[in-house]
Image: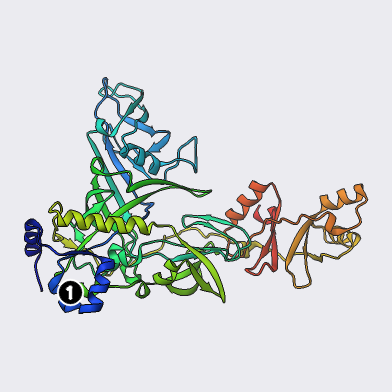
Amino acid sequence: MTKTYQEINEKIRSGEAIVVTAEEMIKIVEENGPKVAADEIDVVTTGTFGPMCSSGAFLNFGHSDPPIKFEHLWLNEVHAYHGNAAVDCYIGVTRMADKRPFEYGGGNVIEELVSGKPIRLRGVSNTTDCYPLGEIDTYFTIDDLNEAILCNPRNAYQRYVCAVNSTERTLYTYMGKLLPNFGNAHYCGAGCLNPLTNDPDYETIGIGTRIFLGGGIGYVIGQGTQHNPNDGFGTLFVKGNLKEMSSEYLRGVNYEQYGTSMFCGVGIPIPILNERLAQKTAIKDEDIITDIVDYGVPRRNRPVLKKTNYKELKRGSITLNGREIKCSSMSSLFRARKIAQELKEWIEDGKFFLNPPAETLPTKTNYKAMRQTSEIKFVKDLKKDAVICYEDCDIQIVANKIINQNINHIVITDREKKLKGIVTSFDITKAVAKNANKLMDIITKRVITTTDNEPVDVASRKMKKHDISALPVVNDKNIVVGIISSEELM
């Protein structure tokens, strides 16, 4: 033990504490070694600012006159969860507005609330003798609330995977818009600035640790949901007073065709109690390893294509299969640095003191997947062989195959079985009516496809959305490996 919490707090109180950011600590340890750094440095500050979907706020509105006990309530048309006492609610950042899905949600409500904007409250009740009011429609600001508590069950992931897309179509995910054929890559997290990266063994992070949260002061109240330190995916459960926070560090975000969330700023001070912590807080981006994962496979255990590190990710491109792929962050490194710097200044100015945790977080937990009692079918379970014709085939041959094999769909490929289009019995009927002679004049070239590992309910939704009755099944090279139709799904 080099120093104690009490000694560090005394230094903060007297204005003598030496505080550096995690990025600054790297150079200090490189030049002087961890022993000297542990003697000289008192606190290392960290920061991260990115989408934290498992976030939300508890609000208390006070009682109306006459009183109401909410059964359902909406904030700016975003359905909030009641299920608490009469006029308490919890609003989650991923809940989308009933009338503006994908464009507005709980994260936007929280940002506007913190900004001081008026929020519409609409609620209905199953009336009782003590709560006789049946409905209410009013407006409030954050100053009108008795309590506004940011309460985030899973924040500050220790690290994230890098997401890519091997399929022929664009994917809209919580990792953003992933372009087809490995057209781009997305990652998240601040690398060497990330809080849990700097103390992965939770020597100083636990229940009661005081932190920077959303521009104000918050606290760690436990391990986050899906806390998985065994695989380097630790998380935090945090809370703080929303009235003290800033919309600069709580920003609603809306992902195209995916949904809503909120960017949240988290910073944690790491007291340098010993040489071991000095070494850990000097971790470099190149030492933080993560996986490049194919999100084109809609399964929990998506294939890992390659290992990478945060130095490569922050470079702006990754190398995959001999190709340079543009890579961008879902987080803001600029804001992460600003959080670490702001927390550093708070400590230097004597405005922020360190808490020893009442209980440290677990370093070994058994992370479990969902227990499923019913079997989920995948396309590979129901697909059948596709009847194929080549792109230079005669229309008459195609028509004969439809009649002789009693089918409605012919898949058109080149000689290597790569998908070129699809023809239906209705297309052949139109060709006869219009005296069309060339197959390529009547085929549908922009084909909606599926893959072996896609759940059948996803394939079904595709058919419904595009008003079609079959999907060619293709592999990652766009080679046809089967077909699934509405008949198989029925």
Residue positioned 35% across, 25% down in the render? 138
Dividing the picture into quarters, in which one does residue 178 lie? bottom right
Of 37 and 216, nearer the camera is: 37
Q: Residue furthest right?
A: 435
User: Is residue 159 shown above or below 339?
Assistant: below
Is any atom of residue 408 visible in this view? no
Q: Is 468 above or below relative to 59?
A: below
Residue 477 x, y percent position in the rendering: 65, 70
Left or right of residue 227: residue 349: left
The residue depicted at 70 percent of the width and 65 percent of the height is: 482
Along the viewing direction, whichever of 164 and 487 lies nearer the viewer: 164
Does residue 309 appear to the left or right of 483 in the view shown? left
- Viewer-closest of 310 and 293: 310
Location of residue 21 in the rendering, given as x and y in whole percent from the top left corner:
25, 64
Image-quadrant location for residue 340: bottom left
Q: How many marks?
A: 1
- Could you tell me residue 2's position as x and y percent? 10, 73
Which quarter shows the N terminus? bottom left
Q: Position of residue 373 (x, y in %)?
A: 46, 58
Residue drawn at x 26%, y 66% as measured from the top left? 22
| Left or right of 130 in this view: 426 | right
Question: Label 1: which residue?
Answer: 37
